[in-house]
Image (spheres, rainbow, N blue to C red):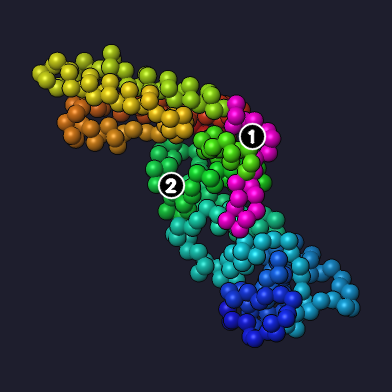
Amino acid sequence: MAAPAHIDDHAPFIPDKEVWFSDGNVVLEAEGRAFKVYQGLLARDSEVFRDLFTIPQPSSMEVFDGCPVVHLTDHPQELRHLLRVIFDGKRYYRPDEQVEFAIVAALIRLSHKYEIDYVRDDYLARMKSCFGTDPGDWDTVSHDSGSPRMNFNETDAIALVNIARLTGTDTILPLGLYLCCQLDAKYLLNGYRRPEGSLEWLDSEDLARCIDARQSLLQKSLISVLQVYDPSTIFPSCTHHFGTRGDCRRTIESMRQKRMERSPTSLLQNYLKSDVSMIRSLQKANLLCQNCADMLCRAGQQRYRANWIILPQLLDLEAPAGWPEE
């Protein structure tokens, strides 16, 4: 894309430095930012743009840099992302490139608005790479705060829920609401500002779901701790201390106590968290024998799956297609 030629400092709009084709034939304007692009390519990909371009224009139609101007209500930063994807294609974001959640969400919102299906589907697939229906995937994604295709942070949860509602993508909704349950009350009640400044908040029904579910999730998380880390059910074939089972019992008691003392937010996070790697590290440090470690891993994985299965129910949702069942 060519940089814009010099335009008078008193011009009504600021030409964008990234999306400006010198031979373009239409200017899109958003909050004073001008993007000079190709009308035909936009009309090809978007019926909404095609309709915008076919609306009869008055003889006094506004012109900028020799091209007709179409005014849009989008934020220029988000519009820039969409135009770069349309005109640069996969050179802008490679399929194997990790993209920030905020950019993915912006592309989904605008491609949905302008009915550019291939962009919407591509970036929804990126979002699903983090928020899907597979418990095994979530264990890795939650630990890494992302997948190879997208990363996220905790405050993205509200936008995630709204994307699910906007696009009817119910498979990402349970994890979105679950993450919202972990947010501070100020974000749930007042919303969260996107990077470009607009406010994102939950609708009243989803807010009620989160408020109602928090207590149930905390209760289930505590039950999981009590059931998995129960010293009284220590593996009969414990091999530490020649069968006295002393070391393993103390380790399990310590693990249980530490989890019971966690903050409410940490307990909510623990509801869908596997402790397998931590248990294996304790085994490696000789604080658990293999038999007891195997027992804890099995019990933890069973509880982890059980918590997954009932998550939609706790959030007052229908289980989406592909969600694990008993």
Identify the amino acid type marked 1.
Leu
How many numbered marks does the figure carry? 2
Magenta stretch: give its range: 192-212
Quarter where residue 301 is shown = top left
- Please report contact status of discs 2 and 1: CB closer than 8 Å, yes or no: no
Task: State whether residue 208 is above or below residue 61.
Answer: above
What is the number of the mark on residue 207?
1
Identify the amino acid type marked 2.
Ser
Across and down, in percent, residue 209 comes to 62, 30
Label 2 vs 1, first from the N-terminus: 2
Disc 2 to disc 1, C-alpha distance:
23 Å
Q: Can residue 272 be seen in this view?
A: no
Q: Is residue 107 left or right of residue 250?
A: right
Q: Residue 45 or 11: which is nearer the viewer?
A: 11
Question: Which residue is located at x 59 percent, y 64 percent?
Answer: 81
Task: State whether residue 22 is above or below residue 158.
Answer: below
Mark 1, secondary structure of its residue: helix
Q: Residue 94 or 77: which is nearer the viewer?
A: 77
Across and down, in percent, residue 196 comes to 61, 58
Mark 2, secondary structure of its residue: loop
Question: Which residue is located at x 26 percent, y 27 percent?
Answer: 294
Q: Residue 276 or 76: which is nearer the viewer?
A: 76
Question: Which residue is located at x 31 percent, y 18 percent?
Answer: 230
Quarter where residue 15 is shown = bottom right
Across and down, in percent, residue 310 comes to 51, 26
Q: Is residue 131 visible?
A: yes
Dot 1, how many residues are within 10 Å of its Cα: few (below 14), some (14-19), or many (20+)?
A: some
Quarter where residue 237 is shown = top left
What is the number of the mark on residue 145?
2
Q: Residue 323 or 316: which is nearer the viewer?
A: 316
Dot 2, how many residues are within 10 Å of its Cα: few (below 14), some (14-19), or many (20+)?
A: some
